[in-house]
Image (tube, rainbow, N blue to C red):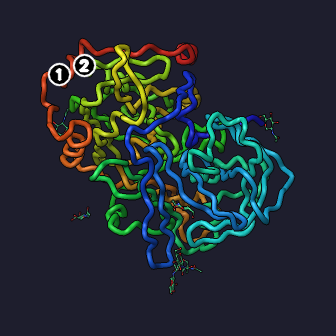
């Protein structure tokens, strides 16, 4: 069977309108992190941040240390190159990613992830990455670890039994009395208010973020799947759950047939660089900015980098503000029609194939994930576990303080001079909002 495209780490390179160009950070610092290891025996992993576009951690497979991308949007492990002490199961598989197909044989080897050791972990060994449109090694990684639900694992589906279970599923199965959750904290480069390093943890909370356990438990929507492989970390926004730059809710109807009135289905995906939102929502965020232009070739809005835009999302009655440093991204070398460098409207019109099938409305990628500490509880997604058989849920703790984020924006984008109140920064009236054109694929889907 031909698999649908996983919501993958590199999907920012994929789309109906092929968002595809090399990313160059403007800043000198291309990576951060390196953390003193904590002197305990739990599992806190450092996450390296490459240009706010790739979040990478180390695993050890068959004795080889391998940097892998963290991807909550897919559920399989693949690595490139050679893995010592690996057993080839002689079953070939191909995982489609934006940058090309990760194809090879399913292998098993001993995996170490943090303090956990898993024998015979199944993974896809990709010997030939020449079809990839980027050189992953120079990007700083050699594979990808999918942290999505086990039901979404293509390898498990192919092997047809628990031999193919995903990494976290195997870890959770090892100790039936520990809680089945994983947490992720992504940092933002060049922002003094952001944590200095990203972290990932398994079955424990990153110190300092304990309050997350009292945040609302957002139930994971299991609705409207085409196949089991489509299960993702998805939930509903609140009614009027997306607040635009003018402080008013952005009203957009869900394309998901079963969604309750006024709520939208979102997928949390650490693998997407730019979040994807309904086209009308992206237009509402950026279309009233003076000097905004829609870049049809790339499928996103561009705006002056000095424009501060506040938006926020609401889940479980809690407001999650987005740092204005994330609402527009300065990480891309993009110019407007006048040839001036501009910033990219990070919440771009959705183009994922899944969205056209009516499975969800929004993919909240890194530009959202940097604003929260996120806990993913796998609950009964995990088989063979005795104590944590509840329904899966997500908890989010805001890490963005609006006033501090404003100050950081002024310091990073405006050289310390707060011009955000200038007339040139005022939003145009609603009647003058610009709208981006629908793509051919969207017209067809309608
Ligand atoms: C952590 O280590 C301590 C002492 O080495 C041990 O008693 C405890 O059981 C360990 N905890 C876990 C979760 O492994
Ligand atoms: C867990 O990992 C940490 C960091 O690698 C290490 O210092 C510690 O000794 C390990 N604990 C156990 C029980 O393996
Ligand atoms: C992964 O391991 C390499 C080599 O030991 C090290 O340089 C790098 O900092 C590690 N990355 C992370 C995110 O810990
Ligand atoms: C790798 O794959 C490409 C096509 O994607 C093929 O042209 C090339 O021969 C392959 N290389 C090896 C060593 O198999
Ligand atoms: C299993 O998890 C429980 C709860 O976290 C912990 O107390 C126990 O030490 C763990 N057992 C092993 C064998 O790691
Ligand atoms: C955690 O929550 C408590 C109670 O709501 C609050 O007093 C405290 O400031 C919070 N701590 C952090 C670090 O947010
Ligand atoms: C964004 O929020 C900050 C803090 O509340 C406020 O100072 C600023 O005026 C807001 N900016 C816009 C463009 O709404």
Q: Is residue 95 above or below residue 145?
A: above
Picture coordinates of residue 312, whole percent (x, y): 29, 39
Report how far apart the C-alphas of labels 1 and 2 lie in the structure: 7 Å
Quarter of the displayed picture in which ligand 3 can be seen = bottom right
- Residue at 48% of width from left, 57% of height from top? 47
Looking at this view, name the residue that lies furthest to the right.
90
Q: Quadrant of residue 308?
A: top left
Identify the secondary structure beneath mark 1. Answer: helix
Nearest the camera: 69 or 334?
Answer: 334
Q: Which residue is mark 2?
A: 290
Q: Earlier in the sequence, mark 1 or mark 2?
A: 2
Q: Are marks 1 and 2 in contact (CB under 8 Å)?
A: yes
Question: Where residue 78 sits in the image (x, y, percent)?
Answer: 68, 51
Using the image, tell me which numbered label, if any, was put on residue 192: none
Q: Is residue 126 left or right of residue 247?
A: right
Q: Position of residue 241 (x, y in %)?
A: 32, 37
Residue 303 seen in the figure = yes
Q: Identify the element where label 2 is drawn.
A: loop
Which residue shows up at 45% across the image and 56% down it?
184
Residue hosting label 1: 424
Decide if residue 198 is on the left or right side of residue 386.
left
Mark 1, other Cα within 10 Å: few <14 / some 14–19 / many ≥20: some
Q: Position of residue 197 (x, y in %)?
A: 40, 58
**351, 115: nearer the viewer:** 115
């Amino acid at each position: 069977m031909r698999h649908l495209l996983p919501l993958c780490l590199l999907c920012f390179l994929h789309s109906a309108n092929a968002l595809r160009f090399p990313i160059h950070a403007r800043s000198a610092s291309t990576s951060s992190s390196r953390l003193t290891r904590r002197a305990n025996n739990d599992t806190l992993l450092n996450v390296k941040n490459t240009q706010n576009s790739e979040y990478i951690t180390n695993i050890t497979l068959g004795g080889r240390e391998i940097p892998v991308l963290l991807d909550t949007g897919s559920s399989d492990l693949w690595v490139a190159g050679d893995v010592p002490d690996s057993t080839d199961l002689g079953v070939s598989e191909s995982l489609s990613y934006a940058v090309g197909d990760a194809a090879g044989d399913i292998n098993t080897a001993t995996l170490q992830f943090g303090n956990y050791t898993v024998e015979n972990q199944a993974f896809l060994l990709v010997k030939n990455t020449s079809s990839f449109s980027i050189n992953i090694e120079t990007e700083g990684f050699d594979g990808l670890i999918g942290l999505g639900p086990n039901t979404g694992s293509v390898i498990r589906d192919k092997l047809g039994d628990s031999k193919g279970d995903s990494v976290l599923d195997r870890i959770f199965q090892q100790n039936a009395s520990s809680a089945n959750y994983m947490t992720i904290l992504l940092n933002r480069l060049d922002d003094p208010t952001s944590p200095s390093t990203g972290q990932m943890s398994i079955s424990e909370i990153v110190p300092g973020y304990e309050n997350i356990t009292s945040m609302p438990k957002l139930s994971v929507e299991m609705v409207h799947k085409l196949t089991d492989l489509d299960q993702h970390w998805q939930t509903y926004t609140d009614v009027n759950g997306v607040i635009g730059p003018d402080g008013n809710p952005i009203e957009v109807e869900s394309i998901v047939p079963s969604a309750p009135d006024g709520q939208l289905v979102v997928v949390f995906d650490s693998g997407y660089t730019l979040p994807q939102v309904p086209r009308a929502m992206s237009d509402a965020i950026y279309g009233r900015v003076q000097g905004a232009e829609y870049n049809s070739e790339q499928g996103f809005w561009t705006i002056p980098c000095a424009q501060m835009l506040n938006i926020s999302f609401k889940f479980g009655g809690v407001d999650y503000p987005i740092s204005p440093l994330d609402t527009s991204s300065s990480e891309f070398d993009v110019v407007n029609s006048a040839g001036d460098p501009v910033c990219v409207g990070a919440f771009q019109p959705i183009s994922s194939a899944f969205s056209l099938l009516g499975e969800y409305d929004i993919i909240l990628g890194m530009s959202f994930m940097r604003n929260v500490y996120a806990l993913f509880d796998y609950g009964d997604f995990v088989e063979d576990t005795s104590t944590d058989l509840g329904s899966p849920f997500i908890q989010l703790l805001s890490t963005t303080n609006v006033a501090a984020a404003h100050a950081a924006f002024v310091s990073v984008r405006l050289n310390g001079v707060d011009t955000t109140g200038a007339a040139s920064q005022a939003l145009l009236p609603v009647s003058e909002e610009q709208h981006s054109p629908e793509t051919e694929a969207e017209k067809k889907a309608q």
